[in-house]
Amino acid sequence: MALRVSLLSLPQELIDEFISYVRDTNDARNCALVSRSWTKPAQRALFRDIHIPSSESDVIFCPRLEETLRTSPRLLQYVRFLIYPRNRNDDKMDQYLERLCSLPFTHLQSVFVLHICPTTPASAAALQQLFSLSCIRRICMYCIFDTSTVLDQMMESFSPQLRHLQLSCASYSPPVRALQRRWQEPVSLESLKINHTKLLGQWLECEPCPLDCSRLTALSVRKELPAQHWPQMARMFQILESLDFTYERDRDVDLAQLPNLLNLRLKLEFTSSVNRDRSLSVALQMLATLTSSSHIQQIALAFLDGVFDQYCCQQLDVAIVNLSMLHLPVVMIEKEIANHEEQVLCFPHLTSKNLLFPADYDDWLQTKHCTL
């Protein structure tokens, strides 16, 4: 009884702060039963992150969720994050999703879509309603499409207020038309991450370009960075602070053209002697473009399939410590090094200068820019 009285006498600010850390659904429900002052914070915790399950329970969860939000519209203000995974196609789920996406969300900020089965036109049409909301700031899509037209239509619904975009999409058919934007104004992104797609090249070829990159501070392109567009990209990305890309043989990247670059991540391929030589050559040429005026603070090195090469690492070690910079960058290694002796053997100069550290998280860009 004394505990209940003490809980009821807590300041509202302390109650709000306490419940903001609650993640378990049952715990949030129990908090809502303590007293009236606990109800709203508990509801906020319950509906803040909505994760639609991908199991058979979808059939029960989705209509129940949609009905709850529709009959109690005041709960919509608490929804911030929606995760929608899918591992099978179901006409009923398409109908429920359409009804859920048609709700007038006012504070929904992030939508995460993970489909391991082809995204149906019905699902795409429903998601377009969400993507067009002015409150949406972040969209993450991991999808497969029967045709690229479905992806085009979904992207054409993006709100100009979108700030953070992450795409890992593939289609079974090649593009049948040039991407045509219907937006009233370009999307002014602050961070962009693209995997397994040539969309960036298509965007740059559009006139006018659908992206306003004047505010872009973080760019991650894991595949198909269009080398022929690099001069145009460099002009567009003048305030870029973080760049992340995977080695490709034809890239010719001049980092001196990015005056505000602070963080660089390179994924190198040492899986064969041919790839090793090409990957090392590209990396060394790119590092050589860093000048005394560069502001690079951190370089992260990742290795495709975890393949490590002692000789190549020694070459990178020498190249980095010999950069003509007043303050050398810290180097993060995205690989577990067996022991200190191996570290000294592969990166002797960086180790001696105390500039080499293990990366504690494999998604380097997400660590630097939590919005991705």
Image (spheres, grey):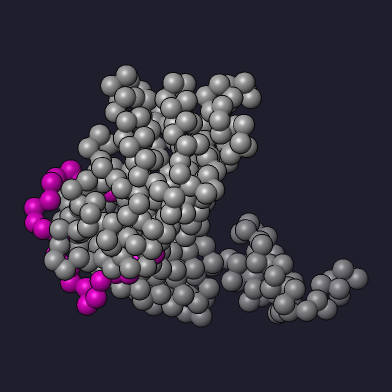
* Dominant secondary structure of the residues highlighted in magenta in the image: loop
Q: State which quadrant residue 259 falls in.
A: bottom left
Residue 280 image point, x, y percent: 35, 29
Residue 252 image point, x, y percent: 26, 42
Report the magenta residues as a range. 168-191
Q: Is residue 225 rendered magenta in the image?
A: no
Residue occupying the far left of the picture: 176
Residue 289 image point, x, y percent: 35, 44
Can residue 199 be seen in the rendering of this structure? Answer: no
Q: Please tell me whether residue 290 is drawn above or below residue 128 in the rendered image.
A: above
User: Considering the image in quadrants, where does the C terminus appear?
Assistant: bottom left
User: Considering the image in quadrants, where does the N terminus appear?
Assistant: bottom right
Residue 229 image point, x, y percent: 20, 52
Is 320 in front, or is 67? Answer: 320
- Which residue is rendered at x = 23% and y = 54% of the image? 231
- Which residue is rendered at x = 31% and y = 24% of the image? 277
- Which residue is rendered at x = 22% and y = 73% of the image? 183
Q: Please tell me whether residue 23 is drawn above or below residue 99 in the rendered image.
A: above
Is 210 in front, or is 158? Answer: 210
